[in-house]
Amino acid sequence: MTTPARPPRPRLLRRLGARARTLARLVGHFLHPARFILAPLLIVLLLAGILLTLTGGLAYVAPFVYTLF
Amino acid sequence: MSDLTGTLARILSPLVWRTPGHSARRLHAFALAEHGSMLDLRLAAARTPSPLRAAAYLKHADDEARHAQMFARRAQRLAAEARKPPSLGPLRADSERLFETLGERDFLAFVHFGEERARRQFEAYSIWFKGHARDQDHKLFETILVDERRHGTYTREFLVTLVGEPEARAAIRRVARWELGRRWMRTGRFVAERVYIATMLLLYVLAAPLAVLVRLARPIRRGWQK
Amino acid sequence: MACVLGISAYYHDAAAALVIDGEVIVAIQEERLSRIKNDPGLPISAALACLAYAGVDPAAVDALAFYEEPFIKLERIMVHLLRHLPRTWRMFPRAIAGQLGAKIWVLDQLAETLGVPRARVVSFEHHHSHAASAYLVSPYDDAAVLVVDGVGEVHSTSIWDGHQGELRMLASVDFPHSLGLLYAGLTAWLGFAVNEGEYKVMGLAAWGRTTLRPEFDRIIKLHADGSYELELACFAHMSDAELGFGPALERILGPRRPPGRPWDLTDPADLRYADAAATLQSVLEDALLGLARRARALTGRKHLCLAGGVALNALANARLRRESGFDRLFVQPAAGDAGGALGAALLASHRLGDRRPKAMTGAALGLPIDVTRTHAVAAELGLRVRRVDDPAAFTAKLIADDRIVAHARGRFEWGPRALGQRSILARPQDRAIRERLNRVIKEREPFRPFAPAILSERTAEYFAADADDMSPFMTTVAPVRPEARARLAAVTHEDGTARLQTVDRARAPELHAVLTALAADGHDPVVLNTSLNGAGEPIVASGEDALAFLLRHAVDALIVEDLVIERPT
């Protein structure tokens, strides 16, 4: 079963732009009148996002080889 | 290939295999590595254009599946002997889709490199177990080593057939460097993960006043909602 | 005339489904390609395979539809993490990392990875996707739709009115009250893995008695209006999602059964766990009956569609069929989260102006096998390979000779059930066959039943039921007639029922041909049908997967289209 090739990834700036727009939509979601009272959660999310970025996230790197220790 | 792996494995063996509980965790980790390897080889069998290589990858994957079960069973038995039995979790690895990431040439080189490294490591463990009268564990590794040696041999043969000897050696060196970089990243992530968790728990504590807000704004709703 | 790709991902059972001009063309669960059971990861392989199968370039996709609203989900998760502070401290770092690290960016990731313009990526609510996945492919013009699962963004149960191709939500029960999480918590308490062990609990129920009702009345309250309420102290899905139950549950029911311990149903301790499974099943059925009756009262419809993971409980579906008051019931075979991909695709297709698809006739929506490639790889593996003119007749003969046959023909199935395209087939008479299958090939607990597949037109001879809208997809059970039990010993469960598949030529032509060949030779037109996979593995998809299965498992032959493949003697 041959797999079709993945399309090439868009350039970094374009990806960052898309992320920025999503972030704006996320802020808009929490600032919506129906859930405005939850807006302080945005602060938690912002701080968590910074921490996540600084620490590189928890991305999985499989131990294909056997760990020694 | 240097025998640094074998030397380190020998030096660390008393620490790694010190109790049934530690041994169980180590063997369970090996079982997961075998399972992950099996998944990658199955993917390779599906993706390679060569039926001959597909057949070889399927046989290799079958060996890895069997090794995973052998390690897992031994881990369960050792866990039961431990003073505080460790919780080992399910035998469920992820695949890194290495065939797609590396291409077939570097995939073969990587598998060869991995099998050779494992062989040296397991030989060291096997000798250590024999020297410490742990016959069951010695036999386990000796059984698996038969396959590991075969895996190391066929992958090199295929690689040389595919790209020739000089390119094969270059590919093996390249994936060795790549794996070194990944080991560096794994170490970094190990540290980063702990920093992340610690700082997030601090954020959790600081967010405590929001718990009151949330309980008022979003009480648990019972029954039908329209 | 739109081309729409639907995606479900990131929680469990990721999948992709392609709908073109309103018709379902292909649908694939990612696990079939990645070989990781219930693979939750972004189903890029499945998505690309769908597009390749249909010959569609990703840039030509008119809409890419995701089955959930990421921000609403994030909001609910944040609210519950903080509401249950400090019990949620263990979950907090990982839950936030999961959301901020990947899940809220899913629509961007899909656009980038698949090469679809971001403006064409849309999303629908989780229960809306589920409801669509059932109603829009059902044979009904109008129907009530009941969605019951663990939880979507907020709802865990919802009632919808399906009318002339449109869906309108009428009522819901919201998280943390959830029948799916009740079942999951008890699955974990019984020592099984959550999201994989629920079928085992259903099978175990037949071995117990419903003697723990007073205890369960302290765990869940069923109200007269059809709603329900969990005793939240018994559950830990707010604080420990992996375990799912709390100490309060153990105070009521006793200690958790240790995971992995072999079952012995002659042991009173294990019998008590079976009683718990039986009681849970009974409580679940009562709850679903209440919900279904409420749905009928709200909608006034004659037919009911079921969706969500709980809709895979075939025992409960049979009881709903008998007692809910609806004339007909339909359950789309991938009723769990994978089905959300299909539902989202259908909703987007409808929004773009396409008509509703024809009713789903079969579940063979996956990819075909590359026979030439399989032949070549089998030869390289040193297996014996030969071609036969009539694979159905050959298979029937093997089955009649008490052989166990791995059967891989046609496009693989959509959903968790094997319906003949990727099945292990055997004679249904002999309990020894069942024991061999359970012990050696499937490595399952001894209490797990096997299911029969029968020629649709002969159903009533063997079962106290006729074929209905659910039976072709194996989403219901039926009592085995007493006079037929000896001939169906290997597929009759402890409670005298079987989760049957009724087979007709249109829906499963390859299996129909095998059953017809059996009947022509004077045998019962029934086979034991279990999925073609080893323990802990997804169902086989490709020829390579089938060969890998043959290498590990001692079946008597593997049939791949017109190839017969055997281990060397």
Image (tube, helix red, strand yellow):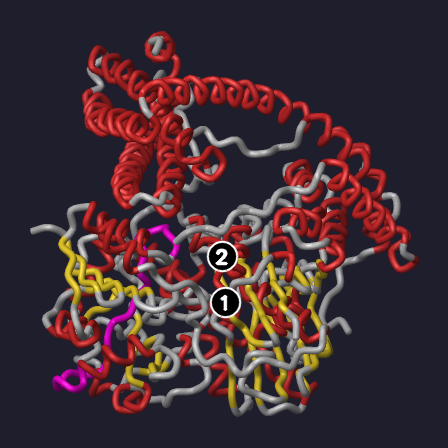
**Residue in front for this viewpoint, C313 or C245:** C313
Horizontal side of C25 relative to A55 (left or right) equals: left
Horizontal side of C425 relative to C68 (left or right) equals: left
Horizontal side of C119 relative to C490 (left or right) equals: right
Where residue C493 appears, as percent x and y from the top left, is: 29, 72
SS category of the residue bearing label 1? strand
Indicate which disc, 2 or 1, sits on the residue closer to the N terminus. 1
Is-magenta flag for residue C533? yes
Which residue is rendered at x = 81% and y = 49% of the image? A26
**Residue in front for this viewpoint, B48 or B128:** B48
**Residue in front for this viewpoint, C63 or C210:** C63
Q: Which residues are magenta?
A: C518-538
The residue that mark 1 highlights is C26
Q: Check disc 1: other Cα within 10 Å, few if <14, some if 14-19, many if 20+.
A: many
Give the chain letter at badge 2: C
Which residue is rendered at x = 46% and y = 70% of the image? C313
The residue that mark 2 highlights is C49
Which residue is rendered at x = 45% and y = 60% of the image? C198
State the image quarter where residue B29 is shown: top left
